[in-house]
Image: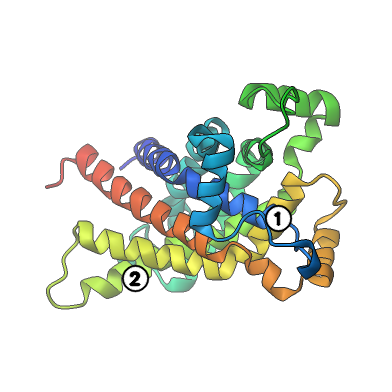
Amino acid sequence: MSFMEIFLCSAFAACFAEFCTIPLDVAKVRLQLQKKVPANEGTPKYRGLLGTVATIAREEGLSALWNGIIPGLHRQCIYGGLRIGLYGPVKSFLGGSDSAHDTSLFQNVLAALLTGAIAIAVANPTDLVKIRLQAEGKLPAGVSGRYAGALNAYVTIVSQEGLGALWTGLGPNIARNAVINAAELASYDQVKMTILKIPGFVDNALTHILAGLGAGFFAVCIGSPIDVVKSRMMGDTTYKSTLECFMKTWKYEGFFAFYKGFLPNFGRLGSWNVVMFLTLEQAKKFLTGAA
């Protein structure tokens, strides 16, 4: 398949997965941005994946669970298409083959690190706008939100904070997406090959689902601390640097704050990877005419 064909398949699969799972992403962002509540001040507003989804739906309406869907689709068109579209060519450039069967785990990981970093460097503005829109909760009557929509958010951020503000949090975002991309793509290849060695398993939808779940689990375990810092950097403008955000989170909330929202994050990434890889495999078969 040509680069453009793989890019289109990847962008379509990523956008479809984004639309299906973004309510879980909204819940994850709210949990990550929620500060630790002292014991004498009651309980946190958001508690657990389903509790957070229910609270948002009850207080803000079902449509609030799809906050940030437009910049989310913008992001997946660019980031999803580039990170997977470039994965094969970069593996070939590194001296191997674009086939998972002919490359080492090290080559797969290195290729995925590079493509994840390149893709998110281009797509960072869409990620910033998506998180800003998701971070807004229900506002008092008569009080309007900071942004009227995705396009207004881009314009407002540039006019009030400057063009460079669209790349706020680029450092942790590159680190997070490079690591998660490596965990997802390399582990998907590895888990899929391992499953296919088990008697009775063939390259079908069940194999793709299991490999997608494995990819999501590895991605969350490895990338969750970076993801928390990235969400806070983009959603809260009081942090001056990535290091400051990391140190304040560690000092005031402890180590486990970096795994805040772990279950909704796995629910989101696990289901996202299942939908994305399943859709991607079927789209590639459709384009190539494979049975």
Residue 111 at x, y percent in the picture? 51, 60
CA–CA distance in space, label 2 to label 1: 34 Å
Residue 24 at x, y percent in the picture? 49, 50
Q: Are marks 2 and 1 in contact (CB under 8 Å)?
A: no
Q: Amino acid at mark 2?
A: Val
Instruction: Provide the secondary structure element on which disc 1 rests.
Output: loop
- Residue in the foreground of this view, choosing between 68 and 284: 68
Q: Amino acid at mark 1?
A: Gln
* Residue beneath the point at 80% across and 67% down: 40
Q: Which residue is tagged 1?
A: 34
Neighbours of disc 1 within 10 Å: few (<14), some (14-19), many (20+): some
Which sits earlier in the primary sequence, circle 2 or circle 1?
Answer: 1
Q: Which residue is tagged 2?
A: 191
- Residue in the foreground of this view, choosing between 158 and 44: 44
* Residue beneath the point at 45% across and 42% down: 18
* Residue beneath the point at 27% across and 41% down: 283
Residue 174 at x, y percent in the picture? 66, 53
Residue 120 at x, y percent in the picture? 61, 46
Query: Do we see residue 117 in this rendering?
Result: no
Residue 254: quadrant of the picture: bottom right
